[in-house]
Image (spheres, helix red, strand yellow):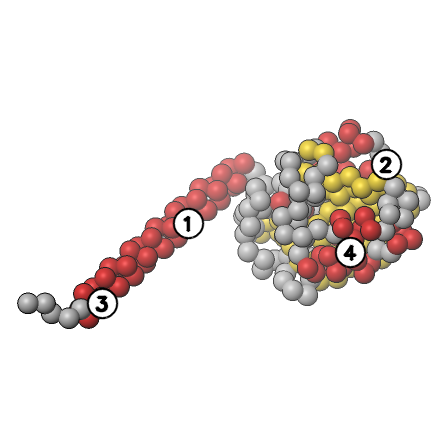
Amino acid sequence: MCNASCIIFGATNLTIDQVKGKRVLEVGSYDLNGSLRPIIESWKPAEYVGIDIKEGPGVDLVCDVDDIVDRFGKESFDIVISTELLEHVRDWKKVISNIKKVCRQNGIILLTTRSFGFPYHAYPDDFWRFELADLADIFSDCTIEKLEKDRIGPGVFIKARKPNDFVEKNFSDYELYSIIVDKRVKEIDQASFTRFQEKYRRRLIRRRLERSIKQFVSKITAVRSRRSGSPMTN
C-alpha cells in the first residue's frame, strides 16, 4: 500500500545508483492504492521481492514479516522498503527488528507509516501511530538520512542506512501511541484489543442502521412528494 506522498518520498530519496544491481525487499507489498515498485524496477535492481500475508497484486511471496529472517536470512537485502505497514502490525518492535536484521550493512531502509490524527483503518487491523520523534528514537541505531512528515495527511517517512558497525538497540520498554487504547503503551493486551473490536463493530452496525433509516426516509419522502404533485383524476 502506498499513497502519492509515499511514492514521491521513495522516488526522490532513492537513486538509480543505489538501486541498480541490488537486492530489494518490499515488506507489505500488496498493491491496494499504489506502489513504489514500478519506479524501483525501472532502475534495474538485481532482484525485487514483494511479500505480504496474502496473494495479490505486487506480491511475489506470501510470507509474514515475523518470518522474514528465517525465510531469507540475515543481511540478505541491500534495500528494504515498507510503506503503510507498521501501523497495522501488532508487534511493531519485532517487525522493525526483523527489517533491520535482513538489511545488509550499509544497506537502506525506507519506511512510511501513519501518525496521530489519522483515522482508524483496519487492514486487517490498525494498532499504532508513529511520530517523527518515535522514528528518530527507533532508528537511532542507524544513520538517518531523511526524516519528514507526510504533507498530505498525518504520517511520517524515514530513510535510514544500516551502519557497518551496527549494534541493534533494545526497544522492549518503548511506549508508542496506540489507537486501540488511546495512549502510549509498551504493548496491547488481548482484553483491550477485544473491547476495542466490540466497540468498533457496534459503531459500524449503528452507522449502517442510521444510513438505512435515512435512505428509507428519503424514499418515503420522494414517494409522498410525487403523489402530492400528481394531477387529480376523475
User: How crowded is the residue under tag 2: few (<14 C-alpha within 10 Å), some, or many (20+)?
Assistant: some
> As displayed, is residue 73 above or below residue 217?
above
Dot 1 or dot 3, earlier in sequence: 1
Q: Which mark is residue 10?
A: 4
Instruction: State which tag comes first along the sequence, 3 or 4.
Output: 4
The three-letter code of the residue at mark 4 reads: Gly
Task: Tell me where residue 62 sits by quadrant.
Answer: top right
Q: Nearer the viewer, mark 2 or mark 1?
A: 2
Q: Classify 10 Å Cα crowding around label 3: few (below 14), some (14-19), many (20 and above).
A: few
The residue under label 3 is 225
Task: Provide the secondary structure element on which disc 1 rests.
Answer: helix
Q: Of the residues shown, which amino acid type is indicated by label 3? A: Ser
Q: Residue at x 87, y 56 (%)?
A: 15
The C terminus is located in which quarter? bottom left
Residue at image mark 2: 76
Which comes sooner in the sequence, label 4 or label 1? 4
The answer to which of marks 2 and 4 sits earlier in the sequence is: 4
Q: CA distance from mark 1 to mark 3?
A: 33 Å
**Residue 176: % across, % down:** 65, 49
Dot 2 or dot 3, earlier in sequence: 2
Q: Residue at x 55, y 56 (%)?
A: 119
- Nearer to the camera, 147 or 21: 21
- The residue lying furthest to the right in this view is 164
In percent of width and height, residue 46 lies at 88, 41
The answer to the question of whether label 2 and label 1 lie on touching residues, with beta carbons closer than 8 A, is: no
Q: Residue at x 66, y 42 (%)?
A: 57
